Image (cartoon, rainbow, N blue to C red):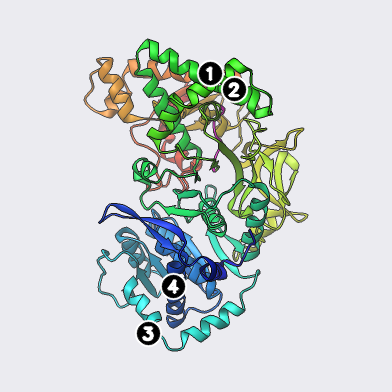
Amino acid sequence: MECVHLGKMVFEKAKNFANRSILKFRDDVEGKWKDVTWGELAAQVKVIAKSLIEMGVKEEDRVAIFSQNMVEIIAVDLACQAVRATTVPLYATSSSSQVNYIVNDAQIGLIFVGEQYQYDRAVEVLHQSNYLKKIIAIDPAIQLSGIDASISFDAFIKHGKESTTADEQLEERLNHLSLQDLTTLIYTSGTTGEPKGVIIRQSNYQQAFHIHNIRLTNLSDKDLSLSFLPLSHIFERAWSYFCMLNNIVVAVNKDPKKIQSVLKEVRPSYMCAVPRFWEKIYMGVNDKIDSFSPFMQKVMRRAIRVGEKCNLEYRRYDKDVPTLLSIQYWFYEHTLFKILKKVIGLDRGRFFPTAGAALSDDVNIFLHSVGFNICVGYGLTESTATVSCYNPANRDYEINSAGDIMPEVEVRIGENDEILLRGKTITEGYYNRPEANASAFVDGWFRTGDAGYLTKQGRLVIRERIKELFKTSNGKYVAPQQVESKLIVDKYIEQAAIIADQRKYVSALIVPAYSVLKSYAESAKISYDSIEDLLQNEKIIAFYEGRIQHLQADLSAYEQVKKFTLLSRPFTPDNDELTLTLKLKRKVIAQHYEKEIENMYKEN
């Protein structure tokens, strides 16, 4: 599929595929999914582009999109590209202070908001910022505050519909589209400092689409991709546009909390997800198996073992599967595994891109055993997403790796085993951050901050974030994410934060899965007055101690958790303990739980 500037894509596609569906959205009033054709999308993008021009948006102006996933924000983004403006996507759950920082840093004058929460935060920013001048409210249900600076999406659209001069200006801008256009500024999560705006030009996107077309040779325009992750994240954003370029319909999921019902309604062929999504499926399936009769538990465990042997010992290496094993797997594939996939809503799945964090080997093996074609990968905002991934058309993958390096992406291992990148998908740097840019590159190679190595087959293995490697007082290095990934696959553990830096041994702050734990307490006849009371119960502490010991059995002694504290509230972005991409802010957590941490290191 030929790559085309995203500012022109919708208009080019509409010429040849005007009546072909390309987007789907759920009409909550009618309770059904509706299609948007290329022709309809092109008409919407055009009028939005004209409205932007009428509102005084100039080339290279920054326009923010502060919303959950919606068809409208895709149209707005494409319209911004058509008029050569730069979009700055913001996470729908961002606080007013986070929005205010980005608005001021990028000098944003116009912001589109999705629903009431985003509108209210934007109004707060409007009163603080010297840059923000206009708020466009997309959802018609938003209650506007009455200030002149905010208008409804319909009122905004009216400017474009009634314009007599914007057509000519739009055509002129379309004629000047360039691969050097600053398409997107995506602000990094900021686990170790203030967020930085990653510069992503049209040339970065075009190269990303090009190399994915080389790698993913088994795509079909008869397929459907579900847009589940936030479009403010480069992973979902680049993937969704890649699908659209290949005429693959993108179903836009508005509410992540409804993903279970949405999956059953849409039944996608593809869906980007983070490991936590698959970990929850793994825990849910195992929990269900544990509830079966002893006989059915044996049947299910045997089916999974057969799947593992068939898919990971034979098919993965393109070996002939022994006849008896092949028959057994065929039976399970068309009975138990088929039912499992249909219950989840992934029975039509062809492959599922998965990145954003490390996927536990146990979860990865389980998923491939039951027939989920998980395409594990590694990438960053700064690399316009994918650096490496499994090849879904080639089953020769390595479970503990992040897959094969993408075509035309160069990877080198530098000092301290740091992964260095070079290529046309790699950002030129951060917006207005000369000092950060100076330290982000070495001899033309981008420093990822991740430690890893290349296998003999040339596959990339990620070990840890370099800045997050802990060194115990005994001189041993501990990779906290590796230990945490071992713990959070347990159905009774929702979150875990490892403590070890300059400490005698490893400890952990554990956030239990409260609802599951309460069910266990009830079945074990453990009475309690509050969640705090329950977490201090000796039987509960002993219960978790046993599970943690089992989970980390294959870790070295110096990596194993020696003490832990059960927390009565989760880590969240609202309390600044997680980034908006749900990564741990370790310094903040250490400050918030200083007392609990010190108690774990008191001498007995």
Q: Residue at x 49, y 40 (%)?
A: 349
Q: Residues within 10 Å of mark 2 (few under 14, many from 20)?
A: many
Q: Amino acid at mark 3?
A: Glu
Give the spatial CA distance, label 2 vs label 4.
50 Å
Image coordinates for residue 85, horizontal then vertical, percent: 53, 73
Quarter of the image holding residue 389?
A: top right
Q: Residues within 10 Å of mark 3 (few under 14, many from 20)?
A: few
Q: Residue under circle 4? A: 43
Quarter of the image holding residue 384?
A: bottom right
Image coordinates for residue 5, horizontal then vertical, percent: 60, 67
Evaluate whether residue 107 shows in this view: no
Give the residues in magenta. Answer: 356-361
Circle 3: element type: helix
Q: Nearer the viewer, residue 144 or 592?
A: 144
Circle 2: element type: helix
Image coordinates for residue 246, horizontal then vertical, percent: 57, 56
Q: Amino acid at mark 4?
A: Ala
Image coordinates for residue 253, horizontal then vertical, percent: 39, 51
Please tell me which of labels 2 and 3 falls first in the chain: 3
Q: Nearer the viewer, residue 397 or 139?
A: 397
Indicate which label's residue lies in the foreground, 1 or 3. Answer: 1
Please tell me which of labels 1 and 3 falls first in the chain: 3
Question: What secondary structure is the magenta-colored segment mainly?
Answer: loop
Instruction: Determine whether label 2 and label 1 are within 8 Å by CB.
Output: yes
Q: Residue under circle 2? A: 310
Kindly identify which numbered label has been placed on residue 162. Answer: 3
Circle 1: element type: helix
Quadrant housing the C terminus = top left
Q: Amino acid at mark 1?
A: Gln
Q: Residue under circle 1? A: 328
Q: Amino acid at mark 2?
A: Cys
